[in-house]
Image (cartoon, helix red, strand yellow):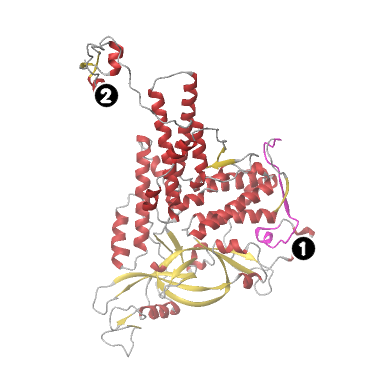
Amino acid sequence: MPLTRRCRCYRCTEAGGENGIEVKSSTYRAHQRRYGSAPAASSSTSGLPNPRRRRQRPPEPSPSQLLYELLAKRHLLSWAGTKSYTSDFPTTTVSGATLPMLEPAETHEDSTREEAFAPDESTFEDDFDSEEDDDDIGMIEVASIAEQLFTKAESKTSLGTNDAQQRNVDSWVWKSHVFVAFMMGMLNSPPDPMHTVYVGICGRRFWHLFLIEGCNNLGKKLKEAQKVMARAILPTSIKRPDYRMALTSGGTPCAEDWTLRQDENEHIDFVPKGLTEEKELKPGPKSVKIIFELGLLLSCIVDMLESDFSEDDVQRLHKYILLYNSKAAALLGKGWIVLSNHIAEHIPDAIRLFGAPKNFSSLPFERYKGTLSKIKTSGHKYGQVELTIMRKVISRSNLQHLLSQSNDTFFRETLLGYVKNQNEFEELPPPTRLTKTIMERDTYLHLLTYLNGPGKCFPGRFVVPHDIHASSRDVSLRMDAIFLHSVSQYGYPTEIRFSGCAAEARKNKADCFGMVKLKDQTVTAVQILWLFEKVLHLNGPGTAAVSEGFMHIRKLKMLSRQEAFGYEVRCGELLDEMNIHFATLDGYLEDLVVPVVAMVSQLVLVPIHTHGQQHRQVYGLKQL
């Protein structure tokens, strides 16, 4: 049984008389801190009740005035102040939620309210000396107003008055409390780019609801379209247009022939599912070129979300998102714009607060859902297991990326190998070998040129076998080597896999192209011919032999847009923003032999048929 004590505070003496009442020890200590002990009654005043002392409070603003004051500060919040076209009266849109602006209530206590809400200017002058801290000032303003709202709620509820007027006031205070808590949580919870753009806008709205369900003529051919995409390996040779294209009996055009069509009046019918009078949609024929521009704009937004950002890039991303929403609303109707479109407009503000989208995107976490599903307790303890694994995965990926980019052999090989061995996930598959064991003469001569170039670790040189001019300091280089089918190496965010196109006549294969860093630190687009390993005495004759990986590459001939097409290309600015370049496989610049570690990233090639006089077919290059 808990210990009790007799409390003689003001509250207990009013309820139980001069001797007070018996309360728990914890209640006794709380009453002593809050009310203190009641003074002993004198003979002259023993019969009179001890009046309760009340603190003289200054007039306080009403909760509606406090809420209006908070809304008036919305220009200090980085995500507020966006106009919404879904209503006709003034609104403020906060993270997709539209709230009506409240008019200020008439009051005679303006001076008191201004005094209570006036910020400490001296503190701001000392702590914030530039305009870059406007977001921090806005946070302090909101926190100050929230503190006054919470203090007001506590003081009102402590009096114990439950009349109708007080309940109305408490209701307003609670609504203000919820609103401020929502705004504070919104500032600390950025929108997820993956669920907003990748899933919400791209996968659900643009691809599934619009192209598949909304356009029946495309939805009925979905299986055929998927077969074409699955078999879309680059052609082994460049073909001229089929002469049957112009004939009526030419049949159904193939995938390559469709790229040659220049039909200005090509349209597809948009018939949305569940169309009602309440939805402001625009069904009917839609121009293929306008849909292409809309899809290219969306692809540019997705591409920018996967890269690092500067201030100019953030403004450009915001411009493209607004442009996409306006174009989609004009093409498909305002009812097509949903919450994901509004949330996407706030992603640039989140980038200014939290950095690149990869810092707050759930995409890295979603990639490891398969690993999490194997853990029986992954859903326990409020998601702490998932959070811990996600942090470890991101930290490990960033560390491996930094080590792989190092110029020091210890960091790039020894330390990175140790980190890989400690990885609980599966290692990369070993490279597969070819039956070829002897280098061709061109590959051999390019390897000699590379080994005798800058960076050689001994005073001699690498020479061909039986060289009559060779000295004792030279190393003989034989033509035998271990040729590889493909090689995988760690990269960010996923591993890089590439192979040689000369092996087994694998011409124009997708993984035979990549971006390579040369000795002069320039990055260029190349085609990989051969991958091989060679045992070398890199430190001179008589030293330990080590195995090094090399690749025989061929530089691609790059073209400008004007050279590639022979005319000005539509949406050229978006192509530049997505870092799409153009090249031709007709002519090559030069062949080189470089180490395998010089590979930076994979390169995707897309064949494009043009109507130019100089190049009938070019390739669009996109770095992954």
Q: Is residue 567 left or right of residue 204?
A: right
Mark 2 vs mark 1: give the one in front: 2
Q: Of helix, strand and loop, which mostly describes the magenta segment?
A: loop
Amino acid on which the number 1 mark rests in the picture: Ala
Considering the numbered disc 1 on the image, is that residue within a helix, a strand or a loop? helix
| Residue 195 in picture, x, y percent from top left | 51, 44
Give me the residue at 78% from left, 61% from top: 247
Pointer 2 or 1: first along the chain = 2
Q: Are marks 2 and 1 in contact (CB under 8 Å)?
A: no
Question: What's the distance in space between the residues labelled 2 and 1, CA to CA?
Answer: 94 Å
Q: Is residue 455 above or below residue 188?
A: below
Amino acid on which the number 2 mark rests in the picture: Ala
Q: In the image, is residue 543 part of the stretch drawn in magenta? A: no
Which label number is shown at residue 246? 1
Q: In the image, is residue 270 part of the stretch drawn in magenta? A: yes
Give me the residue at 33% from left, 19% from top: 52
Q: Is residue 192 above or below residue 259?
A: above
Where is residue 412, by image quadrant?
bottom left
Mark 2 surroundings: few (<14), some (14-19) or many (≥20) residues within 10 A: few
Give me the residue at 25% from left, 86% from top: 472
Q: Is residue 122 above or below residue 374?
A: below
The residue carrying mark 2 is 30
Q: Does the rendering let one see residue 366?
A: no
Q: Which residues are magenta?
A: 253-277
Considering the numbered disc 2 on the image, is that residue within a helix, a strand or a loop? helix
